[in-house]
Amino acid sequence: MTPSDAPAPLTQTGQPGRRPVTSRAQISAVAIDLFTANGFEETSVDDVADAAGIARRTLFRYYPSKNAIAWGDFDGHLDAMRALLTDIPPTEPIAEALRRALISFNRVPPAELAGHRRRMTLLLGVPALQAHSMLMYAEWRQVVAEFCAQRLGLSDDDHLPQTIAWMCLGTALAAYDQWLADPATDLETLIITGSRTLAEGVSALS
Amino acid sequence: MTPSDAPAPLTQTGQPGRRPVTSRAQISAVAIDLFTANGFEETSVDDVADAAGIARRTLFRYYPSKNAIAWGDFDGHLDAMRALLTDIPPTEPIAEALRRALISFNRVPPAELAGHRRRMTLLLGVPALQAHSMLMYAEWRQVVAEFCAQRLGLSDDDHLPQTIAWMCLGTALAAYDQWLADPATDLETLIITGSRTLAEGVSALS
DNA sequence: ACTATAATGGCACTCGGTGCAGAAAAACAC
DNA sequence: GTGTTTTTCTGCACCGAGTGCCATTATAGT
């Protein structure tokens, strides 16, 4: 969740060599415009390259695939999530820590909210992107699993941390689905509600 | 989880027209052999078609994509999951119902265990298949969500049923990952362990 | 033998993605 | 300014997945 665009591949001033003509962020923005307006499948990579003012071949040097364009800079946000979790004091119970991290991670400035919504509509709505997102989520889950493992004195790839990471992902994505389906809802409220189920479990329901 | 091969597109005897020369199940079996032996990316669709003794064009009439071949007949198993859930008596608490369904759904006859393992190794290990699987999981989640919604007197697409469905999926997949990583583990035991976290929540851990 | 039906198979085409080699821009040295 | 080095951009040829179209082949029934 919460991908977006950041600086990324910008050559330092003072370095030799030709300057990049554009940026990953700009390409992603242009592409999302096209995808939203004309549909993802209906928009070819050439269309995006043309709109971005670069050659097709160049586009594939900024992004490894058409799917990846829609995500923009995700690695940057992964680092943010990692920082968020490590900054939480060890006194905080693990369920509360995850709840707070989920909320902070998915908070977006009001100015970016509309754009964020458009992007997430694509990522969670277009089948090809739903599928591709699985690969992004895997990295995100790993970050959560590392935190849980550390807290529980286990290894990253142990069963329990991985299970919790999956559940956190589910909590976030279920909230996003609701939020996208109904613009009147508040994403943060949904995440808080979901975190309750995450913390208290399914047996607390019946 | 737990895909496999079933009859699927077999023309009824007594019908006019040419008989199918093979079956979805057979194609999937042949393909998994190739994928496992030579790698998924390294194996072309033509390779699979040749090994199955049919034309490339014909292969795409059995399966809509290369990715789908690895899954075999999933819809059949979806129906099984649906039946499993509806057969559980309403007196059973929801957490217990989900636990039992997860266990039954993922139980495989010992004779098929080795093949199942090979298939799941591909599905959960190859990036392209991990991604594609997301689309299968979506249908599976929907089945679980429908059950939860009915139990809780809510709509299929309400927040809570969808959240629970996501968590169930996570429980199953985390168990599978562990099982594949270490052949000595028992899948059912892992699912039972995961179901505990699902039922009791994360706050029960610290 | 003739007809209707359903599956197979070949061909050409689109599109996503890659390897390669050369052109273009920028910094620096002289 | 000329030349060198570094980095990016671009065009081209190529591969593999997936599709539309149409002819071909096999089966059942008359």
Image (cartoon, coloured by chain):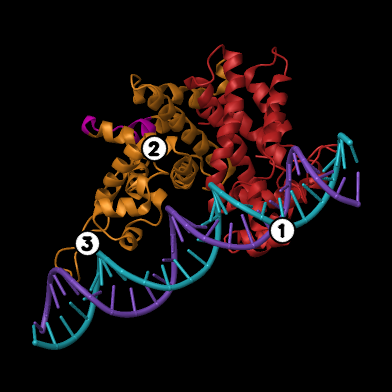
Chain colours: A red, B orange, C cyan, D purple
Nearest the eye: B145 or A57:
A57
- Residue A52 percent location from the top left of the image: 73, 58
**Residue pointed to by mark 2:** B122
**Residue pointed to by mark 1:** A33
Residue shown at 29%/41% (left/top)?
B33
Q: Amino acid at mark 2?
A: Leu
| Magenta residues, dominant SS class | helix
Q: Is residue B27 above or below residue A48?
A: above
Q: Is residue B5 above or below residue A52?
A: above
Q: Amino acid at mark 1?
A: Asp
Q: Which residues are magenta?
A: B100-111
Q: Is residue B105 visible?
A: yes
> Do pointers 1 and 2 mark residues of a single chain?
no
- Residue A88 percent location from the top left of the image: 72, 19
Quote the CA–CA distance across marks 3 and 2.
27 Å
Q: Is residue B49 above or below residue A1?
A: below
Sequence-wise first label, 3 or 2 = 3
Contact between labelled residues 3 and 1, with CB atoms less than 8 Å apart: no
